Amino acid sequence: MLSREDFVSRFGGVFEHSPFIAERAYDAGSVTEPLTASGLHAALAAAFRAASREERLGVLRAHPDLAGRLAIAGELTEDSRKEQAGAGLDRLSPAEHARFTELNAAYVRKFGFPFIIAVKGLDKDDILSAFETRIGNGLDEELATATTQVERIALLRLISILPEGK
């Protein structure tokens, strides 16, 4: 079994800039060998759901805006950079970038956290469509949707870290 320090070092970034999720899952004894993406995801997601509302909001707020200023400045985490590039968000036209910027600002004003979507398998048009739909949601609905998306992102990251349960 990995030490707590090694576990947090390896999996602390699965939930964006929120190593406390990995720490709590490890401390709860819910991490078991062999490490598999699905088993580890269940443990981490349980720790995430058990966090206070403010802590969960902090996890949501740790996510970058899609095609936002961090992407432009090259300051995304490696996972976020790859995810956004895979969806083509690093190749937006000026008009598309302006639309994402406008939607990002309106979304954060309305909900207090950035728009979050698991972009794997989506393209910029899919993401823009979801963005335009979800901005009309109420706070509770969008908080639930964003939480589900954060957990999906975590699972996809774990699958890339632990292919075949290694």
Image (cartoon, rainbow, N blue to C red):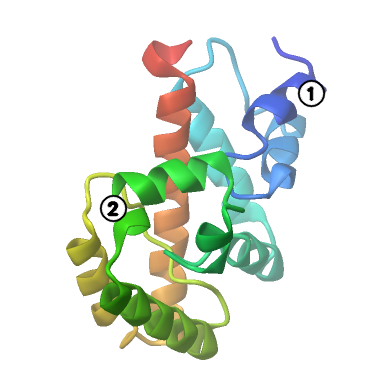
Residue marked by disc 1: 4
Q: CA distance from mark 1 to mark 2?
A: 36 Å
The residue at the point 59 percent across, 46 percent down is 77
Q: Is residue 151 left or right of residue 125?
A: right
SS label for mark 2: loop
Residue at 48 percent across and 10 percent down: it is 166
Mark 1 belongs to which amino acid?
Arg
Q: Where in the figure is residue 126, as x and y percent of width and height?
A: 19, 63
Q: Nearer the viewer, mark 1 or mark 2?
A: 2
Task: Give 26 or 150, whichever is nearer the viewer.
Answer: 150
Q: Nearer the viewer, residue 57 or 82?
A: 82
Residue 127 position (above or below residue 17): below
What residue does disc 2 label?
A: 88
User: In terms of image quadrants, where is residue 25?
Assistant: top right
Considering only vertical position in the picture, is 82 above or below 94? above
Q: Residue at position x 57%, y 51% from top?
A: 76
Q: Is residue 60 visible?
A: yes
Q: Position of residue 32 (x, y in %)?
A: 60, 18
Q: How many marks?
A: 2
The residue most toward the front is 94
70 on left or right of 54 = left
Rendered location of residue 135, percent (x, y)? 34, 83
Residues packed near mark 2 inside 10 Å, few (<14), some (14 to 19) or many (20 plus): some
Q: For this view, does 148 lie left or right of residue 124?
A: right
Q: Which residue type does callout 2 highlight?
A: Gly
Q: Residues within 10 Å of mark 1 (few under 14, many from 20)?
A: few
Sequence order check, earlier mark of 1 and 2: 1
